[in-house]
Amino acid sequence: MSGYYADVIVAGAGFTGLSAADALVSAGLDVVVLEARDRVGGRVERMAFADGVGMDTGGQFICDEMPNVMALTRRFSLPLAETPLEGAFLVQPQPFSEAGSSFAESGRIRARANRIDPRDPGIAGLTAGEWLARQSDPEGAKASYQAMVEGLWCRPVGEIPLWYLIDNDRRTISNGNELQYFAEGTIHAAAEALAATLGKRLRLDTPVVRIDRADGSVSVTTGAGDVLTARQVIIAVPPVMASRIAHTPDLPNPLKGALTAWKSGTVIKGLVRYERPFWRDRGLSGMIMWRDTLGLFACDVSSRQASALVMFAGGPVAVEWSGQGHAFIEAEIRRRLVAALGAQAGDVTGLLIRDWVGDPWSGGGYSDVITDLQAYDAEGILRTGAPPVHFASSELASSFPAYIEGAIVAGREAAARVIAVHQSAIATSASGS
């Protein structure tokens, strides 16, 4: 592999890297994609039950307001299932009648936060947790809001800058139902289909450990010691993972600072399969939020292929559970569902568990989060990059950060920057000749 020359090397074959490569190949550039794992998809992943029915154990949900990922499902003819939402929402532990009002109140807190200008000096240095403590809402509503934040951003509410939470939330431009659909054949199949279009341009089990910039080109060193050269590089991995790649010469100080402003999210995902969706017999939707353990959430992901609930543990609870091992996680998922839905929830026919805490190639899930209270410009600095080295990840997307849609958007935005540099170089060369 040593000595290979390409127009662009893409480090990472998640949806960001695959989408960037797809756009670059379409523009006629010579591309090679290097992926550290033995599979594509990054934080989107497929696992299967004993009978072969596959489900997404990473990113899963999409909606009509996500045009890029919806276009991919049409391009590769992936059937979609509408997430079952009819029925009552449960908040545990509390009386059934309180669930709806508590959820609505937490939504009002979220809307109030989003009316604040992220650059308002009045919230400078304030975490989302500190701001929440100052609100006069009922404690149940505040607990539901905190549960929502820690379940979505997968970090403690006391670590997340309020300005970052607001800015991030504003870029999620949907009607509020990001859980509208999931792919029956797994959304990971879209990543595999994109990868298939790349053919030999894609190299698995090939981590990037070092990048050298010199003389108008970039040399990339892999974990096996091979060196590849290119005109430009896209580092299409989350910021925490990107910060672990060595650079010669060192990256400019603003870039190094921007890379250290993040921490990886922490999440565990469990898919619990049943013979049938028995919770519907009681008029329940299968949606459950736990207030005694913030960051814990479940919903119905039943389709024609399988009846199932998905359960997420995000933020501090994921770290706690992960430290106690797989057997504890499985027992706790079963216990919680039985307590919420009754004895039938114990009649599990299949259980898939994916612990993303400290994942070696993504850092965690489902997104890195800025925890530096003053790092207002970290995202913009990373988007600017240090050409010919460019950075791309779902976290940096102009819309739907931390979602699959955001990963695709970020990949295409990075590809557009690379193409602009490439075309400028061609024009300069032509004018010089």
Image: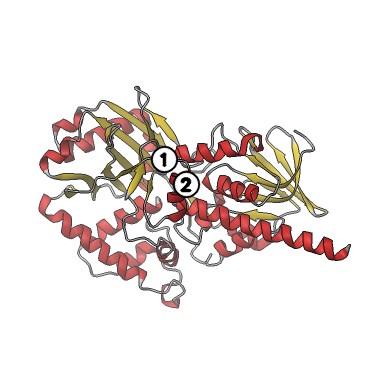
Label pair 2/1, CB-CB below 8 angstroms: yes
| Local secondary structure at mark 2 | helix
- Which quarter of the figure is the C terminus placed in? bottom right
Q: Position of residue 265 (x, y in %)?
A: 44, 48
Q: Which amino acid type corresponds to the residue marked 2 in the rendered image?
A: Leu
Work out whether residue 273 or residue 106 is closer to the camera in this orientation and state it.
273
Q: Which amino acid type corresponds to the residue marked 1 in the rendered image?
A: Leu
Task: Say if 106 sits above or below 223 in the image.
Answer: below
Disc 1 crowd rating (10 Å Cα; few below 14, some 14-19, many 20+) is some
Disc 2 crowd rating (10 Å Cα; few below 14, some 14-19, many 20+) is some
Mark linked to residue 72? 2
Work out whether residue 253 or residue 169 is closer to the camera in this orientation and state it.
169
Task: Say if 402 sits above or below 357 in the image.
Answer: below
In this rendering, would 173 be left or right of 16?
A: left
**Residue lying farthest to the right in this orientation:** 433
Question: Could you say which quadrant of the image residue 412 lies in?
Answer: bottom right
Q: Is residue 323 visible?
A: no
Q: Position of residue 121 (x, y in %)?
A: 45, 77
Q: Mark 2 or mark 1: name the one nearer the start of the chain.
A: 2
The structure residue drawn at horizontal position 50% and vertical position 51%, both measured from the top left corner, is: 407
Work out whether residue 277 or residue 327 is closer to the camera in this orientation and state it.
277
The structure residue drawn at horizontal position 64% and vertical position 41%, both measured from the top left corner, is: 33
- Which residue lies under the disc numbered 1? 78
| Local secondary structure at mark 1 | loop
